[in-house]
Image (spheres, grey):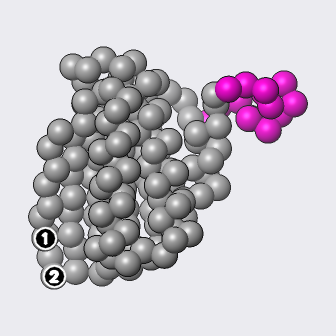
Amino acid sequence: MTTNRVDISDNTVLYTLQLPSKLDSITTVENFIDNLKEEYKIADDTYANMLTCMSEATINAIIHGNKQDENKKVYINLEVHDGKRMQFTVADEGEGFDYERLPDPTAPENLENLTGRGIFIIKHLADQFIFNMKGNEIELHFKL
């Protein structure tokens, strides 16, 4: 795992992480978010939303994107703007997917499924989310 921090201007900081595609990489993401909470004094509700969304996005990248191939990486970038806004990007090396054609996890036929709620959760907890065209990268925005 590689983590870097670069001050790219007076009011913008960039963090980058490269994680192997294995489930215990989630611990690294959780620790990273915990450290951000302390450094930027993130409110508890925003922290909880951020932690949940980043965990979901990273798990999706590891399992669905990279198929848990440890030779593939998950790339996480974070831009912190003025200490008031965070923009995360989570990307994998997979083939992507059509994010507009996901089954509705609230539909009666899907209620008992054990998976399929990650994007639904992200849609409701992030201030904004954007997929790239290929579907192997998601951008998550949070106001602090």
Q: Confirm whether the magenta stretch covers residue 102.
A: yes
Q: Is residue 28 visible?
A: yes
Quadrant (top left/top right/bottom left/bottom right) for the N terminus: top left
Residue for point 58% across, 39% down: 118
Judging by the rendered image, the residue that carries numbered circle 1 is 7
Q: Total marks drawn?
A: 2
Which amino acid is tagged 1? Asp
Q: Secondary structure at mark 1?
A: strand
Q: Confirm whether the magenta stretch covers residue 69.
A: no
Left or right: 55 with respect to 125? left
Quadrant (top left/top right/bottom left/bottom right) for the C terminus: bottom left
Could you classify mark 1 by the number of other residues whose Cα lies within 10 Å: few (under 14), some (14-19), or many (20 or more)?
A: few
Which amino acid is tagged 2? Asp
Judging by the rendered image, the residue that carries numbered circle 2 is 10
Please say if 83 is above or below 24: below
Left or right: 28 with respect to 51? left
Image coordinates of residue 99 in percent, x first then y, are 56, 35
Residue for point 45% across, 44% down: 55
Image coordinates of residue 67 in percent, x first then y, are 39, 18
Could you classify mark 2 by the number of other residues whose Cα lies within 10 Å: few (under 14), some (14-19), or many (20 or more)?
A: few
Q: Tell me which segment is drawn in magenta.
A: 100-114
Q: Name the residue nearer the viewer: 3 or 79.
A: 3
Q: Based on the displayed image, in which of its 4 quarters is residue 49 positioned?
A: bottom right
Image coordinates of residue 58 in percent, x first then y, are 41, 39
Q: Secondary structure at mark 2?
A: loop
